[in-house]
Image: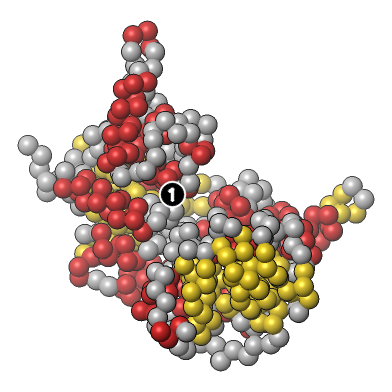
């Protein structure tokens, strides 16, 4: 019989060093059977590195891993999974050309005689797991044809194929709808009731306080403390994470708005959105808020020339314009910081300098050669202006924290000297300290005369950064609020399709 007082997992004095960086400095962490233990810290604090050590993806320089009190060595992910340790990655690790079923049982496909794959058994088992997750797609579908949210569900389905002792969820809800989150939380509760230890990594404090029993905080690769969730609060957790209290108030004076820089009149792109109208002035942040599928990202993509509208008009600086490509948008002074920085905003293998100067390479060439001096000058300017933390311009962007990666993308588009800056989900997958920095940056950019559009799925964020809020539902603008008149209730009503009397 299992002793539930014995930790399902113990990580003791774990040290991991990369060239020039001590990523983990004697970290201790444990999780009990049937417990949800949240692991928090700013981007770059060492959370993902610690979990990759646990999952056998990295080998620690020193320290010990124990499962139910017994020392173990995880030399690779297959050994970790055999020991009952499953890591559900923040970045999807699926094979796009394979079916959902093949991905769910990757490396352990059921076999018949002579090593042949037992496709019938594979399909039956995989569909049973997807049904348990309440997925509305078949296990036979090719993964590349699934939405990001459904690909995340396939990633989660992998955890249910083994008799798990410990399951690590790394930012599992980043791409999920509210309905899918409910299913995920039910699965976590089910695993917990079976005595499985859950490690939950997230930047979303509401989820942490809803799900977890304990919270451990890392900062700069070091253990900073463990708190009982019921006995703590967001302020105390934040102080441990960033070493200071977080000021969420607006400190700047009342903004002064200039002329209308962007005007959209009855813009439509069926079936994604219809008859959308709004304006953005210089010095102003206009926030777009709505549920998944409301059409917010699609509007941004249309303004940037990634989609062509069916009807309507776009005016920039009071001049009617046609935008048929991103090249047109950039020439008009419109820049877009995309929703998915890693897939749409960065070349992860390239260095910081080359990422920032990528859109203007053509302008930095002398004959067949790039002007490295000009490139470095541009990088240094935005590194200082945005306070990008990196050892040098030579650092690969892929190893930076989420917050610094986002600053690289913002710096890239600011270097194009835009008049209108559109930022889609500015702090997705970013820790609370970096979130605060990005919010402050957006307010400062508006104060410097930019016309800023912010698209966000987080109500606190859109309330904090916006001067006006456009609430959308099912491809239509439901209401527009000034920051002085908006309430949480009225905003929720608007994005739910409820048009109150006040809206008229």
Q: Residue at x 66, y 56 (%)?
A: 307
Q: Residue at x 40, y 26 (%)?
A: 107
Q: Where is residue 358 in the image (x, y as percent from the top left)?
A: 73, 55
Which picture quadrant has residue 257?
Answer: bottom right
Q: Where is residue 228 in the image (x, y as percent from the top left)?
A: 21, 64
Q: Residue at x 20, y 47 (%)?
A: 190
Q: Residue furthest top?
A: 114
- Left or right of 294 in this view: 104: left
Q: Which residue is drawn at 56% across and 92% down?
A: 254
> Colour scheme of this structure image?
secondary structure
Which picture quadrant has residue 129?
Answer: top left
* Residue 445 seen in this snapshot: no
Q: In this view, does 27 lie above or below 459?
A: above
Q: In this view, does 189 lie above or below 439?
A: above
Depth check: 215 or 191 in front?
191
Quadrant into which the N terminus falls: top left
Depth check: 334 or 47 in front?
334
Which picture quadrant has residue 360?
Answer: bottom right
Q: Mark 1 points at which residue?
A: 149
Depth check: 223 or 292 in front?
292
Q: Where is residue 45 in the image (x, y as percent from the top left)?
A: 43, 58
- Left or right of 275 in this view: 202: left
Q: In this view, does 111 lie above or below 293?
A: above
Tell me if mark 1 has few (under 14), some (14-19) or many (20+) residues whose alpha carbon lies within 10 angstroms of its own. some
Q: Where is residue 278 in the image (x, y as percent from the top left)?
A: 61, 76
* Residue 287 seen in this snapshot: yes
């Amino acid at each position: 019989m299992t002793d539930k007082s014995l930790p399902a997992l113990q990580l003791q004095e774990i040290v991991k060093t990369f060239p020039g960086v001590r990523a983990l400095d004697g970290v201790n962490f444990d999780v009990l059977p049937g417990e949800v233990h949240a692991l928090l810290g700013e981007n770059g604090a060492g959370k993902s590195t610690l979990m990759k050590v646990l999952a056998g993806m990295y080998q620690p320089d020193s320290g010990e891993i124990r499962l139910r009190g017994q020392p173990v060595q995880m030399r690779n992910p297959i050994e970790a999974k055999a020991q009952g340790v499953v890591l559900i990655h923040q970045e999807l690790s699926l094979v796009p050309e394979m079916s959902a079923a093949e991905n769910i049982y990757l490396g352990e496909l059921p076999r018949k005689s002579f090593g042949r794959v037992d496709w019938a058994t594979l399909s039956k088992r995989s569909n049973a797991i997807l049904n348990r997750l309440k997925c509305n797609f078949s296990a036979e579908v090719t993964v590349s044809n699934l939405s990001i949210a459904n690909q995340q569900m396939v990633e989660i389905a992998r955890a249910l194929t083994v008799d798990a002792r410990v399951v690590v969820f790394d930012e599992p809800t980043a791409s999920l709808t509210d309905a899918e989150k409910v299913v995920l939380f039910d699965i976590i509760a089910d695993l917990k009731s079976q005595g499985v230890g859950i490690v939950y990594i997230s930047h979303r404090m509401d989820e942490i306080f809803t799900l977890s029993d304990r919270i451990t905080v890392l900062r700069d690769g070091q253990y900073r403390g463990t708190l009982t969730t019921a006995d703590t609060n967001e302020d105390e957790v934040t102080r441990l994470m960033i070493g200071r209290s977080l000021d969420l108030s607006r400190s700047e004076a009342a903004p002064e708005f200039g002329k209308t820089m962007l005007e959209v009149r009855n813009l439509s792109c069926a079936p994604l959105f219809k008859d959308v109208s709004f304006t953005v002035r210089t010095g102003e942040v206009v926030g777009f808020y709505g549920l998944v599928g409301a059409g917010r990202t699609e509007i941004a993509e249309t303004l940037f020339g990634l989609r062509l509208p069916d009807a309507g008009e776009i005016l920039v600086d009071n001049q009617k314009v046609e935008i048929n490509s991103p090249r047109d948008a950039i020439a008009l002074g419109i820049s877009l910081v995309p929703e998915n920085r890693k897939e749409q905003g960065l070349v992860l293998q390239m260095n910081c300098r080359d990422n920032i100067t990528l859109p203007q390479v053509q302008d930095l060439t002398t004959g067949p050669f790039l002007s490295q001096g000009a490139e470095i000058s541009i990088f240094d300017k935005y590194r200082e202006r945005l306070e990008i933390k990196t050892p040098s311009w030579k650092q690969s962007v892929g190893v930076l924290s989420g917050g610094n990666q986002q600053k690289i993308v913002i710096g890239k588009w600011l270097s194009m000297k835009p008049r209108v800056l559109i930022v889609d989900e500015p702090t997705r997958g970013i820790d609370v300290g970096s979130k605060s920095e990005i919010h402050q940056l957006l307010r400062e950019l508006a104060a410097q005369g930019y016309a800023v559009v912010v698209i966000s799925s987080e109500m606190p964020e859109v309330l904090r950064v916006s001067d006006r809020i456009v609430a959308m539902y099912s491809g239509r603008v439901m209401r527009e609020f000034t920051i002085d008149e908006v309430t949480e209730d009225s905003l929720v009503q608007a994005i739910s399709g409820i048009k109150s009397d006040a809206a008229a």
